[in-house]
Image (tube, rainbow, N blue to C red):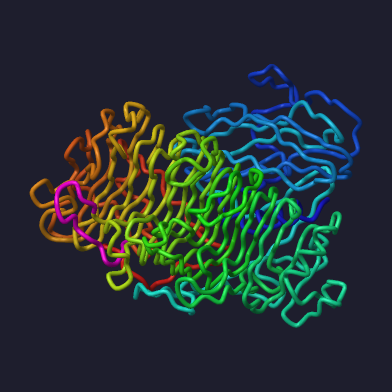
């Protein structure tokens, strides 16, 4: 099997608890899918085979386990041969779980070009209501240069306990390994970007590996080390010295599609990947431990240093377990489609498909936030994507100390002119930690998604931990709005599921100076449709000035009668202050919900959210245009600690809130949320 496919399977297996979606055993438990079960188009799981087979296509396992309110990741492999193009159809099928209620139905086609055997990932958002239920995934109708391996059907079981170990079975054989890791770390709450990481570290609990993998069990690949030589053959014993040389060799490397970066610092890194790098994986070396390889862009302030990793039109590409630090505009940038000079991608490229950014530490970003340059922070962030990107997965990363956004995704620039047909279908932002962001931007998001094209689908933002997301008074751009947001859906972002996230407290929280002006906000959405916010927990802090949810029409030029299908239910809001909530102009509040732009003619469904103040003050449940139709007040949700653990007897789990619980397991395996930073309200 091609090494990129194997390594991604290793990464997902070792990250099983953290991503809450991993392979189960080969035995299906109560399998709702059999070889002859029909799916909507009437095909069977054995499907049809067209063409001359030179390889096998199969799922990694016949059984997967996933926690509620997360995303199941089901991987398809092509192995045993790669001559000619190949494709296979896939679809979810119902069991005890119901499509559209318990999970998002998926149908589509996975395709490979001649010589390509990198994995394809199906991302399936799962709701909190799916706990204890099952659904299926099956492959059908294979064409081209492959035939079916085994298995071609799988059961996905939704369980609140999740799964902590993995055994995968594929047509090419199987392997398993186990191990453990632990970490500790700290986070600066000073609101300044510095050359010292605020993210903490992940450390191996044994001398062999933080992931449990040994060299003998790894897929084949080339090795790079700060102590190597480019005249070496690139083996473990004789590694290359430079990343640029490794990239050059990889472009003609055949099946050896993994680069292992040995521990150490790679200074002044500026890697740019194109279609010549399709199918590659750039990874930490597992025996060295997660995040042991440090790619440093050399930035010490705005307009200095480099952008560390740029992925321009590259597909089936993975960045796994690296530390990216001290960069100019972005740590990891992904782009597809026409050139986007505003976002910093001056050349056109094909759509970037199936890019996975997983288990990385992304620290100290100096994105230019000057309005003189016309970007005000648009050109970057810790991890940022621009233009046409399909099935981009941003998973289990730690993003810290950013002058601008933490994680940013948009299919075009703010005008909508650079890529009017672009979309970011299948975008998944899950299980990440985002700390100390938006320090200078004045109008940004710890997680920011925009879509002025209004046409992207199947977007998931789930199980992320966010803290300290408001701009610093000493650093912020004074010409920008004084508004920063934990999760920001801007200018048409639609078809997004936002669930299971923890929005911790933030320093520097700002009140609204007057009506229709912005304050610090937990959530913001503008002009979109079919956005579902549920099962999130939000700490409004001790000042009583953070707005719960800003819901607005971006402009009177936009037909906002299309803002249908939006809902905001089953979330928990806590705080600890005296007096009223002062988040929206003293003469027009106190409000939890407001529009700082233009009122939409269609309001969201807002109900069954829980509000509790650990102090003597009160949390608002109302707004200038709408409020919570059925608020839950006066009941202590029993949260505690830096990670807002909820006691098993919490009333939040009862009807009508029916809070699904927080999965946790954020960041790379072994990562621990730092105990510094703005403390929680309870």
Q: Is residue 497 magenta?
A: no
Q: In the depicted view, which residue is nearer to us: 145 or 42?
A: 145
Q: Is residue 600 above or below residue 267?
A: above
Q: Provide the residue span drawn in magenta.
A: 505-518
Classify residue 606 as left or right of residue 113.
left
Classify residue 323 as left or right of residue 466.
right
The residue lying furthest to the left in this view is 587
Image coordinates for residue 540, horizontal then vertical, percent: 26, 56
Q: In the depicted view, which residue is nearer to us: 599 or 541?
A: 599
Inspect this view and state whether residue 484 appears: yes
- Say which residue appears at 12% left-offset and 60% top-offset: 578
Q: Is residue 288 above or below residue 495?
A: below
- Say which residue appears at 86% left-offset and 77% top-offset: 231
Image coordinates for residue 501, horizontal then vertical, percent: 41, 51
> The C terminus lies in which quarter of the figure?
bottom left
- Say which residue appears at 87% left-offset and 72% top-offset: 233
Image coordinates for residue 98, horizontal then vertical, percent: 52, 27
């Amino acid at each position: 099997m091609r090494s990129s496919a194997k390594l991604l399977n290793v990464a997902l297996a070792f990250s099983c608890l953290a991503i809450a979606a991993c392979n189960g055993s080969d035995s299906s438990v109560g399998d709702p899918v059999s070889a002859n079960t029909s799916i909507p188009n009437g095909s069977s799981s054995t499907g049809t085979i067209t063409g001359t087979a030179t390889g096998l296509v199969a799922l990694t396992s016949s059984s997967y386990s996933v926690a509620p309110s997360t995303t199941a990741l089901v991987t398809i492999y092509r192995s045993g041969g790669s001559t000619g193009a190949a494709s296979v159809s896939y679809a979810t099928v119902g069991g005890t779980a119901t499509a559209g209620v318990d999970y998002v139905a998926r149908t589509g086609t996975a395709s490979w070009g001649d010589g390509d055997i990198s994995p394809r990932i199906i991302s399936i958002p799962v709701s909190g209501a799916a706990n204890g239920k099952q659904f299926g995934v099956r492959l059908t109708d294979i064409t081209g240069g492959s035939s079916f391996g085994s298995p071609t059907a799988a059961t996905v079981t939704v369980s609140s306990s999740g799964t902590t170990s993995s055994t995968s079975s594929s047509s090419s054989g199987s392997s398993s390994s186990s191990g453990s890791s632990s970490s500790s770390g700290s986070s600066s709450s000073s609101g300044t970007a510095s050359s010292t990481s605020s993210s903490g570290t992940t450390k191996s609990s044994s001398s062999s590996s933080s992931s449990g993998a040994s060299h003998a069990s790894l897929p084949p690949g080339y090795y790079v080390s700060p102590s190597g030589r480019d005249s070496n053959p690139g083996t473990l014993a004789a590694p290359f010295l430079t990343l640029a040389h490794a990239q050059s060799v990889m472009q003609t490397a055949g099946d050896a599609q993994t680069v292992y970066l040995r521990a150490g610092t790679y200074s002044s890194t500026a890697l740019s990947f194109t279609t010549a790098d399709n199918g590659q994986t750039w990874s930490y070396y597992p025996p060295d431990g997660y995040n042991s390889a440090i790619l440093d862009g050399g930035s010490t302030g705005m307009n200095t240093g480099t952008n560390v990793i740029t992925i321009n039109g590259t597909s089936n590409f993975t960045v796994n377990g690296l530390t990216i630090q001290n960069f100019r505009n972005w740590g990891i940038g992904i782009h597809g489609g026409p050139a986007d000079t505003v976002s910093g991608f001056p050349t056109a490229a094909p759509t970037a498909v199936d890019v996975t950014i997983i288990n990385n530490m992304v620290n100290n970003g100096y994105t230019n936030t000057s309005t003189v340059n016309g970007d005000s922070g648009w050109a970057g962030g810790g991890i940022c994507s621009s233009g046409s990107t399909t099935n981009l997965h941003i998973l289990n990363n730690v993003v810290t100390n950013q002058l601008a956004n933490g994680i940013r995704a948009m299919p075009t620039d703010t005008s909508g002119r650079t890529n009017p047909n672009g979309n970011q279908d299948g975008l998944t932002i899950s299980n990440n930690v985002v700390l100390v962001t938006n320090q200078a931007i004045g109008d940004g998001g710890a997680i920011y998604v925009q879509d002025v094209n209004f046409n992207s689908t199947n977007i998931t933002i789930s199980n992320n931990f966010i803290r300290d997301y408001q701009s610093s008074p000493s650093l912020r751009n004074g010409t920008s709005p004084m508004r920063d947001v934990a999760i920001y859906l801007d200018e048409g972002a639609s078809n997004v599921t936002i669930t299971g996230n923890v929005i911790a407290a933030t320093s520097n929280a700002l009140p609204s100076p007057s009506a229709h002006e912005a304050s610090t906000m937990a959530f913001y959405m503008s002009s979109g449709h079919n956005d579902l916010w549920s099962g999130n927990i939000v700490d409004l802090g001790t000042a009583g000035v953070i707005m719960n949810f800003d819901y607005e029409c971006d402009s009177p030029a936009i037909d906002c009668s299309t803002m249908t299908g939006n809902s905001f239910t089953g979330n928990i809001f806590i705080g600890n202050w005296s007096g009223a909530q002062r988040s929206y102009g003293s003469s027009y509040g106190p409000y939890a919900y407001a529009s700082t732009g233009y009122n939409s003619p269609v309001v969201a469904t807002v109900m069954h959210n829980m509000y509790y103040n650990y102090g003597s003050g009160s949390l608002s449940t109302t707004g200038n245009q709408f409020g919570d139709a059925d608020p839950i007040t006066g009941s202590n949700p029993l949260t505690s600690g830096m990670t807002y653990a909820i006691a098993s007897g919490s009333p939040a789990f009862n009807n009508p809130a029916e809070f699904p619980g927080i999965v946790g397991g954020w960041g790379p395996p072994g990562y621990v949320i730092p105990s510094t930073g703005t403390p929680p309200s309870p």
